[in-house]
Image (tube, rainbow, N blue to C red):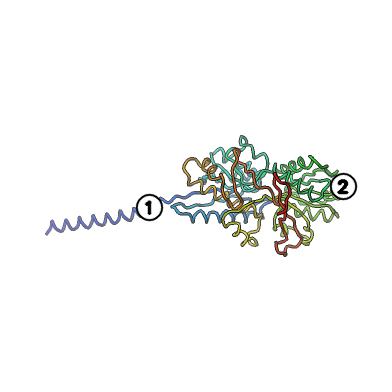
Amino acid sequence: MKTNRTLALLLTATLFAAAFAGCIGEDEAEDTTETVKIGFLNPQTGPLEADAPGFSWGVAQAIDDLNAMPGDVVFEAVEVNSGCDGTVGSTGAQTLVDSGVVAVVGAACSGASMGANAILSAAGIPMISYASTNPSLSSDADYPLFYRIVPSDAIQGPAAADMMSEAGATDLAILHMTNDYGSGLADSVETAWNETMPMCSAGKIGYEETATDFAASAQAIADAGCSAVFLSSYINDAALIIEALHEANYTGHIFSGDGPAGVGLYEKYADDDSGLANVTVTSPRAGSTYGDFDARYDANAAEVGSIKQYVLTAYDATMIIGKASQEDGSITDAIESVGTNYEGASGLLNFLDNGDVGGAGYNICTYSGDSTDADGGFACNKYWTAEGGVQSA
């Protein structure tokens, strides 16, 4: 009886141990789920602060879509402030390095991307900007492991010049921020314009991106009788400048680049909406859009706001990084592989050898001066390509 009792106890212990081992195995299987952290540099402060929630929405939508893919991978966005500033961007980049991200979405502002790149490239971490357009970023030697899915302002300058010429402008004043974005775009526009047309006597006027008083500059442009003025600005300062131009009784045509483009300008413009009538801007053109994210944005546009094209590019940058993280080999090689003939919400993307994209040209969009009309008071009825110039949409 003693022997049988001992055998029974041993059998019970063996069965319990097997069951316990099975439980441990299940727990260990759950613990093997891979977490992929994707960094996100977002301008939560600074001149693009108003657009940050829209960029964040685009990234969050991409994270949801990545997590819906089959596999035992959990994708997570690690969001930090890039502040539209090189110092803030580099600080945020270091936080992302310390967080163990595989690659970084951002930054938006060119200066922030430049500052962040120094930190990220030293750590071997690639970044894909969704909105930085300064031509200097095209240098792979100066900014290694930097990719962007918006075209350089070296391309936007000729687009803007053709837009203004086609609209009947005969001479031009340029009012621009003195930061990396504002100066780079202003120089590109001036170079392209001067190829065929003269500058107005008011010339090119620079201002700090934190400036809020534009009365003197606006009056100088009005007094010179310039037929057109181009604003190399963000959304907040563009609204203030347009108000100042009207107060100075300026009657010429007001143009701008992509910085303030979108229905959000109505929200920032303090005067009556009619003051934005006929303001015309360039905005990167998606060409064909793939998938359903473009439609998702349109369905939520009133809530999301921001510059639509850059919400689309923020989404695409996140998706490219997420998909690349599941490829074999280095993350950089995988980004270049995934980013070849990539059918994105912002168009068909192909990374060039220096990390740039050629783009699909620029939309030419005009404000009606009535934010309640059918298209929100912002219609893109023309577009520009390097091959065809200005064309009807």
Query: N-terminal of the two: label 2 or label 1?
Result: 1
| Numbered circle sitting on residue 29 | 1
Q: What is the residue that sits farthest to the top in this orientation?
A: 141
Task: Residue type at mark 1: give it.
Answer: Ala
SS under mark 1: helix
The picture places residue 221, in percent across and down from the top left corner, at: 84, 48
Query: Quick one: quadrant of the C terminus?
Result: bottom right
The picture places residue 290, in percent across and down from the top left corner, at: 58, 54
Q: Mark 2 points at which residue?
A: 224
Q: What whole-number distance in Å separates the C-alpha atoms at marks 2 and 1? A: 73 Å
Query: Quick one: quadrant of the N terminus?
Result: bottom left
Q: From the viewer's side, name the closer residue of 125 and 320.
A: 320
| Numbered circle sitting on residue 61 | none
Crowd class of label 2 (few under 14; some 14 to 19; many from 20; radius 10 Å): some
Q: From the viewer's side, name the closer residue of 243 and 334.
A: 334
Tags 2 and 1 touching, CB below 8 Å: no
The picture places residue 311, in percent across and down from the top left corner, at: 62, 54
Crowd class of label 1 (few under 14; some 14 to 19; many from 20; radius 10 Å): few
Please determine whether, in this image, residue 336 is positioned above or below residue 35: above
Q: From the viewer's side, name the closer residue of 282 and 126.
A: 282
SS under mark 2: helix
Please give the name of the residue rendered at 60% of the width and 51% of the height, measured from the top-left corner: 314
The total of numbered circles placed on residues is 2
The picture places residue 135, in percent across and down from the top left corner, at: 68, 40
Q: Quadrant of residue 12?
A: bottom left
Question: Quick check: 382 left or right of 202?
Answer: left
Task: Residue type at mark 2: give it.
Answer: Ala
Q: What is the residue that sits farthest to the left in this orientation?
A: 1
Question: Quick check: 29 left or right of 322?
Answer: left
